[in-house]
Image (spheres, grey):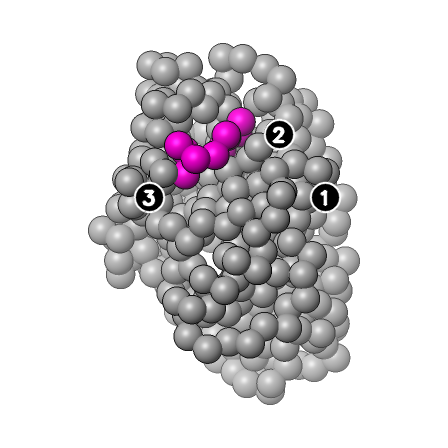
Amino acid sequence: MNYLVTGGSGFIGSHLVEHLLKDGHFVINVDNFDDFYDYQVKIKNTLESVQQSTDFEFSDKENDIKKLVNQTKSENYILYYTDIRDKEALAQIFKNQKIDVLVHLAALAGVRPSIERPIDYEEVNIKGTMHLWELCKEFGVKKNVIASSSSVYGNNEKIPFSETDNVDRPISPYAATKKCTEILGHVYHHLYGIDMIFLRFFTVFGPRQRPDLAIHKFTKLISENQEIPFYGDGSTARDYTFIEDIIDGVVKSVKYVEDHHNIYETINLGESEVVNLNEMVTGIEQELGKSAIKKNLPMQPGDVEKTNADIQKAKNLINYSPKTKYQNGIKIFVEWFLRNR
Protein backbone atom coordinates (compact mmCIF):
# COMPACT_ATOMS: atom_id res chain seq x y z
CA MET A 1 0.00 0.00 0.00
CA ASN A 2 1.03 3.60 -0.61
CA TYR A 3 0.53 5.93 2.37
CA LEU A 4 0.72 9.72 2.40
CA VAL A 5 1.63 10.70 5.96
CA THR A 6 1.51 14.41 6.75
CA GLY A 7 3.69 15.44 9.66
CA GLY A 8 5.72 12.29 9.18
CA SER A 9 8.84 13.84 10.71
CA GLY A 10 7.09 14.73 13.96
CA PHE A 11 6.74 12.73 17.16
CA ILE A 12 3.78 10.50 16.29
CA GLY A 13 4.36 10.73 12.55
CA SER A 14 7.93 9.44 12.61
CA HIS A 15 6.89 6.42 14.69
CA LEU A 16 4.07 5.69 12.24
CA VAL A 17 6.41 6.01 9.24
CA GLU A 18 8.85 3.62 10.89
CA HIS A 19 6.08 1.08 11.49
CA LEU A 20 4.70 1.31 7.94
CA LEU A 21 8.15 0.92 6.39
CA LYS A 22 8.90 -2.14 8.52
CA ASP A 23 5.64 -3.65 7.22
CA GLY A 24 6.87 -3.17 3.65
CA HIS A 25 4.67 -0.25 2.58
CA PHE A 26 5.58 2.80 0.50
CA VAL A 27 5.50 6.04 2.51
CA ILE A 28 5.22 9.60 1.23
CA ASN A 29 6.12 11.96 4.07
CA VAL A 30 4.96 15.59 3.84
CA ASP A 31 6.41 17.84 6.54
CA ASN A 32 7.23 21.56 6.63
CA PHE A 33 9.76 21.38 9.53
CA ASP A 34 7.95 24.28 11.17
CA ASP A 35 9.88 26.52 13.57
CA PHE A 36 7.49 25.59 16.40
CA TYR A 37 10.55 23.74 17.74
CA ASP A 38 14.10 23.06 16.57
CA TYR A 39 14.07 21.56 13.07
CA GLN A 40 17.10 19.46 14.01
CA VAL A 41 14.84 17.37 16.26
CA LYS A 42 12.68 16.52 13.24
CA ILE A 43 15.72 15.65 11.15
CA LYS A 44 16.79 13.14 13.81
CA ASN A 45 13.22 11.79 13.99
CA THR A 46 13.24 11.30 10.24
CA LEU A 47 16.56 9.49 10.22
CA GLU A 48 15.43 7.19 13.02
CA SER A 49 12.18 6.46 11.21
CA VAL A 50 14.00 5.26 8.08
CA GLN A 51 16.59 3.31 10.11
CA GLN A 52 19.51 5.60 9.31
CA SER A 53 22.17 6.91 11.67
CA THR A 54 21.24 10.15 13.43
CA ASP A 55 24.81 11.40 13.06
CA PHE A 56 24.16 14.39 10.81
CA GLU A 57 26.39 17.35 10.00
CA PHE A 58 24.17 20.38 10.50
CA SER A 59 24.76 23.70 8.75
CA ASP A 60 21.63 25.75 8.02
CA LYS A 61 17.99 24.72 7.88
CA GLU A 62 17.30 24.92 4.14
CA ASN A 63 20.42 23.05 3.09
CA ASP A 64 20.08 20.52 5.90
CA ILE A 65 16.53 19.60 4.87
CA LYS A 66 17.48 19.38 1.19
CA LYS A 67 20.31 17.03 2.16
CA LEU A 68 17.88 15.00 4.30
CA VAL A 69 15.43 14.67 1.39
CA ASN A 70 18.15 13.25 -0.86
CA GLN A 71 19.72 11.08 1.83
CA THR A 72 16.50 9.35 2.84
CA LYS A 73 14.91 8.80 -0.57
CA SER A 74 14.53 5.12 -1.39
CA GLU A 75 12.26 2.72 -3.25
CA ASN A 76 9.95 2.69 -0.23
CA TYR A 77 10.18 6.27 1.05
CA ILE A 78 10.15 9.85 -0.16
CA LEU A 79 10.15 13.07 1.87
CA TYR A 80 8.54 16.26 0.59
CA TYR A 81 9.56 19.46 2.36
CA THR A 82 6.13 21.04 1.90
CA ASP A 83 3.61 23.10 3.85
CA ILE A 84 0.00 21.92 3.73
CA ARG A 85 -1.05 25.55 3.26
CA ASP A 86 0.57 25.40 -0.19
CA LYS A 87 -2.13 23.72 -2.26
CA GLU A 88 -0.16 23.92 -5.51
CA ALA A 89 2.78 22.08 -3.99
CA LEU A 90 0.45 19.46 -2.55
CA ALA A 91 -1.22 19.04 -5.94
CA GLN A 92 2.11 18.12 -7.48
CA ILE A 93 2.54 15.36 -4.90
CA PHE A 94 -0.92 13.96 -5.64
CA LYS A 95 -0.15 14.09 -9.36
CA ASN A 96 3.24 12.42 -9.07
CA GLN A 97 2.50 9.74 -6.48
CA LYS A 98 -0.07 6.96 -6.22
CA ILE A 99 -1.81 7.38 -2.87
CA ASP A 100 -4.02 4.69 -1.35
CA VAL A 101 -4.54 6.20 2.11
CA LEU A 102 -4.01 9.65 3.62
CA VAL A 103 -2.92 9.64 7.27
CA HIS A 104 -3.12 13.30 8.23
CA LEU A 105 -1.13 14.10 11.37
CA ALA A 106 0.32 17.52 10.46
CA ALA A 107 -0.93 20.46 12.51
CA LEU A 108 0.12 23.49 14.44
CA ALA A 109 0.06 21.96 17.91
CA GLY A 110 -0.19 23.32 21.42
CA VAL A 111 -3.02 24.79 23.44
CA ARG A 112 -1.20 27.77 24.96
CA PRO A 113 0.53 28.96 21.73
CA SER A 114 -2.80 28.84 19.91
CA ILE A 115 -4.14 31.57 22.19
CA GLU A 116 -1.33 33.84 20.97
CA ARG A 117 -1.57 32.82 17.28
CA PRO A 118 -5.19 31.88 16.55
CA ILE A 119 -5.12 32.92 12.88
CA ASP A 120 -2.05 30.77 12.18
CA TYR A 121 -3.82 27.80 13.75
CA GLU A 122 -6.87 28.35 11.57
CA GLU A 123 -4.73 28.57 8.42
CA VAL A 124 -2.80 25.36 9.10
CA ASN A 125 -5.27 23.16 10.92
CA ILE A 126 -8.43 24.04 9.01
CA LYS A 127 -7.44 25.54 5.67
CA GLY A 128 -4.45 23.21 5.22
CA THR A 129 -6.61 20.20 5.98
CA MET A 130 -9.23 21.34 3.48
CA HIS A 131 -6.52 21.61 0.81
CA LEU A 132 -5.79 17.93 1.39
CA TRP A 133 -9.46 16.98 1.16
CA GLU A 134 -9.94 18.97 -2.02
CA LEU A 135 -7.07 17.01 -3.54
CA CYS A 136 -8.40 13.71 -2.16
CA LYS A 137 -11.67 14.56 -3.94
CA GLU A 138 -9.89 15.47 -7.18
CA PHE A 139 -7.55 12.47 -7.25
CA GLY A 140 -9.90 9.85 -5.84
CA VAL A 141 -8.17 9.19 -2.52
CA LYS A 142 -11.11 7.71 -0.62
CA LYS A 143 -9.46 6.51 2.60
CA ASN A 144 -8.43 8.93 5.37
CA VAL A 145 -7.28 8.65 8.98
CA ILE A 146 -6.95 12.05 10.65
CA ALA A 147 -5.50 13.25 13.96
CA SER A 148 -7.93 15.05 16.21
CA SER A 149 -7.31 15.74 19.89
CA SER A 150 -8.68 15.13 23.35
CA SER A 151 -8.63 18.93 23.75
CA VAL A 152 -11.97 19.07 21.91
CA TYR A 153 -13.65 17.91 25.14
CA GLY A 154 -12.66 21.10 26.99
CA ASN A 155 -13.55 20.95 30.67
CA ASN A 156 -16.06 18.18 30.11
CA GLU A 157 -17.91 17.48 33.35
CA LYS A 158 -18.69 13.88 32.46
CA ILE A 159 -15.84 11.45 33.15
CA PRO A 160 -14.58 9.48 31.26
CA PHE A 161 -14.87 11.37 27.97
CA SER A 162 -16.94 9.56 25.36
CA GLU A 163 -17.20 10.14 21.63
CA THR A 164 -20.94 10.73 22.11
CA ASP A 165 -20.35 13.66 24.51
CA ASN A 166 -21.16 17.18 23.39
CA VAL A 167 -17.92 18.94 22.37
CA ASP A 168 -19.34 22.30 21.34
CA ARG A 169 -17.50 24.25 24.05
CA PRO A 170 -13.75 24.16 23.34
CA ILE A 171 -11.59 26.42 25.52
CA SER A 172 -8.67 27.10 23.18
CA PRO A 173 -8.26 27.98 19.49
CA TYR A 174 -6.31 24.75 18.99
CA ALA A 175 -9.21 22.68 20.31
CA ALA A 176 -11.66 24.66 18.19
CA THR A 177 -9.66 23.99 15.01
CA LYS A 178 -9.67 20.27 15.73
CA LYS A 179 -13.42 20.26 16.29
CA CYS A 180 -13.92 22.23 13.07
CA THR A 181 -11.98 19.66 11.05
CA GLU A 182 -14.15 16.86 12.44
CA ILE A 183 -17.25 18.75 11.27
CA LEU A 184 -15.83 19.66 7.87
CA GLY A 185 -14.63 16.10 7.42
CA HIS A 186 -18.21 14.92 7.57
CA VAL A 187 -19.05 17.26 4.70
CA TYR A 188 -16.39 15.67 2.50
CA HIS A 189 -17.48 12.21 3.58
CA HIS A 190 -21.13 12.95 2.80
CA LEU A 191 -20.61 14.77 -0.50
CA TYR A 192 -17.67 12.87 -1.97
CA GLY A 193 -17.67 9.46 -0.30
CA ILE A 194 -14.33 9.86 1.46
CA ASP A 195 -14.10 7.33 4.29
CA MET A 196 -12.72 8.97 7.44
CA ILE A 197 -11.68 8.08 10.95
CA PHE A 198 -10.79 10.92 13.32
CA LEU A 199 -8.56 9.91 16.22
CA ARG A 200 -8.76 11.91 19.44
CA PHE A 201 -5.30 11.42 20.94
CA PHE A 202 -4.94 11.66 24.71
CA THR A 203 -1.57 13.13 25.88
CA VAL A 204 0.88 10.97 23.96
CA PHE A 205 4.36 10.43 25.41
CA GLY A 206 7.43 8.31 24.77
CA PRO A 207 10.69 8.43 22.79
CA ARG A 208 10.88 11.38 20.34
CA GLN A 209 8.21 13.31 22.25
CA ARG A 210 8.23 17.00 21.32
CA PRO A 211 10.61 18.97 23.57
CA ASP A 212 7.92 21.55 24.39
CA LEU A 213 5.62 18.97 25.99
CA ALA A 214 5.55 18.63 29.76
CA ILE A 215 7.14 15.21 30.25
CA HIS A 216 10.06 15.99 27.95
CA LYS A 217 10.48 19.52 29.30
CA PHE A 218 10.31 18.38 32.94
CA THR A 219 12.74 15.52 32.36
CA LYS A 220 15.28 17.90 30.82
CA LEU A 221 14.93 20.52 33.54
CA ILE A 222 15.05 18.04 36.43
CA SER A 223 18.11 16.33 34.95
CA GLU A 224 19.83 19.76 34.77
CA ASN A 225 18.79 20.72 38.34
CA GLN A 226 16.65 23.59 37.02
CA GLU A 227 13.21 24.75 38.11
CA ILE A 228 10.17 23.23 36.46
CA PRO A 229 7.06 25.39 35.84
CA PHE A 230 4.42 23.79 38.07
CA TYR A 231 0.95 25.05 37.21
CA GLY A 232 -1.76 24.87 39.83
CA ASP A 233 -1.76 22.63 42.90
CA GLY A 234 -0.76 19.41 41.13
CA SER A 235 -4.28 18.03 40.93
CA THR A 236 -4.73 18.58 37.18
CA ALA A 237 -4.67 15.17 35.53
CA ARG A 238 -4.10 13.65 32.11
CA ASP A 239 -4.80 10.35 30.43
CA TYR A 240 -1.18 9.64 29.41
CA THR A 241 -0.86 7.30 26.44
CA PHE A 242 2.39 5.64 25.41
CA ILE A 243 3.48 6.11 21.80
CA GLU A 244 3.49 2.39 20.96
CA ASP A 245 -0.14 2.11 22.03
CA ILE A 246 -1.05 5.15 19.93
CA ILE A 247 0.68 3.71 16.86
CA ASP A 248 -1.16 0.42 17.39
CA GLY A 249 -4.43 2.38 17.38
CA VAL A 250 -3.50 4.37 14.28
CA VAL A 251 -2.46 1.27 12.33
CA LYS A 252 -5.63 -0.59 13.33
CA SER A 253 -7.70 2.44 12.27
CA VAL A 254 -5.96 2.47 8.90
CA LYS A 255 -6.73 -1.22 8.47
CA TYR A 256 -10.37 -0.65 9.44
CA VAL A 257 -10.89 2.19 6.99
CA GLU A 258 -9.22 0.16 4.24
CA ASP A 259 -11.49 -2.82 4.83
CA HIS A 260 -14.81 -0.97 5.20
CA HIS A 261 -16.92 1.45 3.20
CA ASN A 262 -19.13 4.41 4.07
CA ILE A 263 -17.06 5.13 7.18
CA TYR A 264 -17.15 8.29 9.26
CA GLU A 265 -16.02 7.64 12.83
CA THR A 266 -14.49 9.50 15.76
CA ILE A 267 -12.44 7.36 18.13
CA ASN A 268 -10.69 8.05 21.44
CA LEU A 269 -7.15 6.71 21.73
CA GLY A 270 -6.06 6.90 25.35
CA GLU A 271 -4.71 4.76 28.13
CA SER A 272 -7.99 5.06 30.08
CA GLU A 273 -6.05 5.66 33.31
CA VAL A 274 -5.51 9.12 34.78
CA VAL A 275 -2.25 10.42 36.30
CA ASN A 276 -2.24 13.78 38.07
CA LEU A 277 0.55 16.34 37.78
CA ASN A 278 2.09 15.41 41.15
CA GLU A 279 2.21 11.73 40.15
CA MET A 280 3.63 12.59 36.72
CA VAL A 281 6.53 14.52 38.25
CA THR A 282 7.14 11.82 40.88
CA GLY A 283 7.46 9.21 38.14
CA ILE A 284 10.14 11.26 36.37
CA GLU A 285 11.97 11.88 39.65
CA GLN A 286 12.08 8.16 40.37
CA GLU A 287 13.56 7.29 36.96
CA LEU A 288 16.13 10.11 37.05
CA GLY A 289 17.00 9.62 40.70
CA LYS A 290 16.64 13.37 41.23
CA SER A 291 14.14 15.66 42.92
CA ALA A 292 12.30 18.37 41.03
CA ILE A 293 12.68 22.02 41.95
CA LYS A 294 9.17 23.39 41.49
CA LYS A 295 8.29 26.94 40.51
CA ASN A 296 4.65 27.21 41.51
CA LEU A 297 2.51 29.10 39.00
CA PRO A 298 -1.23 29.71 38.52
CA MET A 299 -3.27 27.67 36.06
CA GLN A 300 -2.90 28.87 32.48
CA PRO A 301 -5.72 29.99 30.17
CA GLY A 302 -6.87 27.18 27.90
CA ASP A 303 -5.60 24.38 30.14
CA VAL A 304 -8.14 21.69 30.95
CA GLU A 305 -8.40 20.31 34.45
CA LYS A 306 -8.61 16.62 33.59
CA THR A 307 -8.67 14.30 30.61
CA ASN A 308 -9.85 10.71 30.73
CA ALA A 309 -10.70 8.59 27.70
CA ASP A 310 -13.55 6.15 27.42
CA ILE A 311 -11.89 3.67 25.01
CA GLN A 312 -14.72 1.15 24.73
CA LYS A 313 -15.52 2.21 21.17
CA ALA A 314 -11.86 1.79 20.15
CA LYS A 315 -11.82 -1.66 21.75
CA ASN A 316 -15.00 -2.73 19.97
CA LEU A 317 -14.35 -1.19 16.56
CA ILE A 318 -10.62 -1.67 15.98
CA ASN A 319 -9.62 -4.07 18.78
CA TYR A 320 -7.53 -1.37 20.47
CA SER A 321 -5.85 -2.52 23.66
CA PRO A 322 -3.26 -0.22 25.29
CA LYS A 323 -0.59 -2.17 27.15
CA THR A 324 1.97 0.29 28.57
CA LYS A 325 1.28 1.70 32.03
CA TYR A 326 2.51 5.18 32.86
CA GLN A 327 5.53 4.24 34.99
CA ASN A 328 6.75 1.68 32.46
CA GLY A 329 6.41 4.26 29.72
CA ILE A 330 8.30 6.87 31.74
CA LYS A 331 11.13 4.40 32.28
CA ILE A 332 11.43 3.85 28.52
CA PHE A 333 11.21 7.58 27.82
CA VAL A 334 13.85 8.57 30.39
CA GLU A 335 16.23 5.90 29.10
CA TRP A 336 15.78 7.29 25.57
CA PHE A 337 16.23 10.87 26.82
CA LEU A 338 19.47 10.08 28.62
CA ARG A 339 20.87 8.40 25.48
CA ASN A 340 19.95 11.33 23.25
CA ARG A 341 20.48 14.47 25.30
Quadrant including the C terminus: bottom right
Report which residue position mark 1 lands on: 22
- Considering depth in this image, is 212 or 195 the residue closer to the camera? 195
Q: Is residue 60 visible?
A: yes
Q: Report the disc number at residue 89.
A: 3
Q: Is residue 272 above or below residue 112?
A: above
Badge 1: residue crowd in 10 Å (few <14, some 14–19, many ≥20): few
Q: Residue 180, percent across and down?
A: 32, 34
Nearer the observer: mark 1 or 3; the answer is 3
Q: Is residue 165 magenta?
A: no
Q: Residue 120, percent across and down?
A: 26, 53
* Residue 113 figure quarter: bottom left
Residue found at x 39% / y 24% = 139
Amino acid at circle 1: Lys
Amino acid at circle 3: Ala
> Which residue ends up furthest to the left in the rendered image?
119
- Considering depth in this image, is 66 or 36 the residue closer to the camera? 66
Quadrant including the N terminus: top right
Report which residue position mark 2 lands on: 1
- Cα distance, mark 1 to mark 3? 28 Å
Amino acid at circle 2: Met
